[in-house]
Amino acid sequence: MIGLVECECLIYDAASLKEKRAVLQRILMRLKQRFNVSVSETDFQDVWQRTKISIVTVSSSRVTTEQELQKALSLIDSFPEIERTITTFDWL
């Protein structure tokens, strides 16, 4: 089972693209280190307070895939400088 989560986020404290990328890189690296997921910024690369993060994982069961994605989303939520606004799940 392949699970894909796309979440649009706001980064309130970012005053420039450089600050946005610093926050985003910290989050993306932590996701890659802690979970068995692939993660990338997939939209709004040139907007300094908004981003779209895509997270993908593969597993033999949907339950395991969903648990891994939920843990990844919880990690994103634990960062005070970023807020998820729209989150969509896709199953392939």
Image: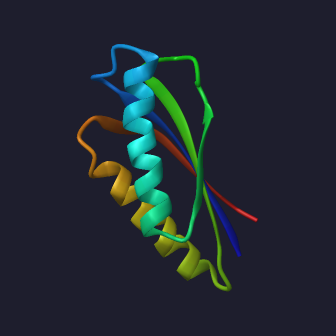
67 w.r.t. 15: above or below? below
- The residue most toward the bottom is 60
- Left or right of 46? Residue 21 is left
- The residue most toward the right is 92
Q: Quadrant of residue 61?
A: bottom right
Residue 50: give x, y in percent of width and height: 46, 25
Q: Quadrant of the C terminus?
A: bottom right
Residue in the foreground of this view, choosing between 43 and 67: 43
For image coordinates 37% across by 23% down, the residue present is 19
Q: Quadrant of residue 73?
A: bottom left
- Left or right of 35? Residue 37 is right
For image coordinates 44% across by 34% down, the residue present is 9
Residue 81: give x, y in percent of width and height: 27, 35
Residue 18: give x, y in percent of width and height: 43, 21
- The residue most toward the left is 80
Q: Quadrant of residue 85?
A: top left
For image coordinates 47% across by 74% down, the residue present is 67
Q: Quadrant of the N terminus?
A: bottom right
Q: How many marks?
A: 0
Identify the coloring. rainbow
For image coordinates 60% across by 45% down, the residue present is 40
